[in-house]
C-alpha cells in the first residue's frame, strides 16, 4: 500500500465519520423511531374504540340516563375514529390537536358511563362488566404509556434536528421538520378513569 492509498483511506474514513456525526443516519433513525411509537399510540386508541361495542352490550340493561351517556360515547367513538393522524401528519399541530380533542371526548364519555354504572349493583356484579372495566382500565394505562413513549421519541428527534452537528444533516440533507408531541386537551384525559366500585353495594 503506497502513501497515496493510505492518505486516501484516511480521508475517506474521516469523511465517513464526519458525515455520521452530521445526522446522516441518526436523524432518519430517530424519525422512524418516533413514527413507530405513534403507531403504538394508534393501536392503543383503536383497542379502546373496539371495546365500545362491548360497553353498549353491558349498558343495555341500564336506565335512560345511561343510554344517553352511551349515545354520547358512541358518537365520540365515531368522531375519534374519523380523525386520522398518519406519520406524515406528526408535524401538523392543528391535526394533532384535533385528534387529541376527539380522543379526550371519548375518554370523558367512557369515564362518565362507567361511573354511572356504579349505581347499579346488578350491572357491577356481572362478569361482563367486571371484564370490560378491567379491559378499559388496562387500555387507558396502555394509552398513557404509549403516549409517554411517543412524546419521548419526539423530544429525542426534535432535539437531534436542532443540535450541532446533527442539525447540518437534518436541514441540508433531510429537510427535517420538528414533530408535534401529543398533548391531552383536557386535564387528566390521558389517565385512566378512577372508579369507586364500593358504592351502591
Image (cartoon, rainbow, N blue to C red):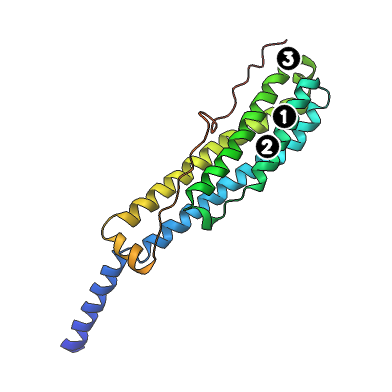
Q: Which quadrant is the C terminus positioned in?
A: top right
Q: Which residue is mark 2?
A: 76
- Residue 181, image x and y in percent? 45, 45
The image shows a total of numbered marks equal to 3
- Please, what secondary structure does the residue beneath circle 1 have? helix
Q: Which residue is mark 3?
A: 119
The CA span between labels 1 and 3 is: 18 Å
Between 112 and 118, the residue placed more toward the observer is 112
Kindly report which numbered mark, 2 or 3, lies closer to the viewer in this rendering.
2
Q: Rate crowding at label 1 as few (under 14), some (14 to 19) or many (20 or more) other CA atoms within 10 Å.
A: few
- Residue 92, image x and y in percent? 49, 52
- Residue 55, image x and y in percent? 75, 32
- Residue 178, image x and y in percent? 40, 54
Q: Residue furthest front?
A: 94
Kindly report which numbered mark, 1 or 2, lies closer to the viewer in this rendering.
2
Kindly report which numbered mark, 1 or 3, lies closer to the viewer in this rendering.
3
Between 68 and 115, the residue placed more toward the observer is 68
Quadrant assignment, res 160: bottom left
Q: Earlier in the sequence, mark 1 or mark 3?
A: 3
Q: Which quadrant is the N terminus positioned in?
A: bottom left
User: Which numbered disc covers residue 167?
Assistant: none
The CA span between labels 2 and 3 is: 23 Å
Q: Which residue is mark 1?
A: 131
Quadrant assignment, res 200: top right
Residue 117 left/right relative to 158: right
- Please, what secondary structure does the residue beneath circle 2 have? helix
Between 20 and 193, the residue placed more toward the observer is 193
Amino acid at each position: 500500500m503506497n502513501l497515496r492509498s493510505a492518505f486516501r483511506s484516511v480521508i475517506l474514513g474521516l469523511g465517513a465519520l464526519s458525515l455520521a456525526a452530521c445526522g446522516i443516519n441518526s436523524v432518519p433513525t430517530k424519525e422512524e423511531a418516533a413514527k413507530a411509537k405513534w403507531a403504538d399510540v394508534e393501536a392503543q386508541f383503536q383497542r379502546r374504540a373496539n371495546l365500545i361495542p362491548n360497553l353498549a352490550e353491558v349498558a343495555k340493561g341500564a336506565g335512560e340516563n345511561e343510554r344517553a351517556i352511551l349515545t354520547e360515547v358512541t358518537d365520540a367513538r365515531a368522531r375519534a375514529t374519523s380523525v386520522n393522524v398518519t406519520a406524515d401528519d406528526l408535524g401538523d399541530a392543528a391535526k394533532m390537536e384535533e385528534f387529541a380533542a376527539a380522543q379526550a371526548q371519548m375518554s370523558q364519555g367512557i369515564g362518565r358511563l362507567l361511573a354511572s354504572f356504579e349505581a347499579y349493583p346488578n350491572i357491577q356484579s356481572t362478569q361482563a362488566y367486571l371484564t370490560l372495566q378491567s379491559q378499559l382500565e388496562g387500555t387507558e394505562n396502555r394509552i398513557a404509556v404509549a403516549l409517554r413513549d411517543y412524546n419521548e421519541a419526539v423530544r429525542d428527534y426534535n432535539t437531534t434536528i436542532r443540535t450541532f452537528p446533527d442539525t447540518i444533516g437534518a436541514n441540508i440533507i433531510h429537510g427535517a421538520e420538528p414533530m408535534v408531541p401529543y398533548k391531552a386537551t383536557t386535564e387528566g384525559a390521558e389517565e385512566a378513569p378512577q372508579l369507586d366500585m364500593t358504592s351502591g353495594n
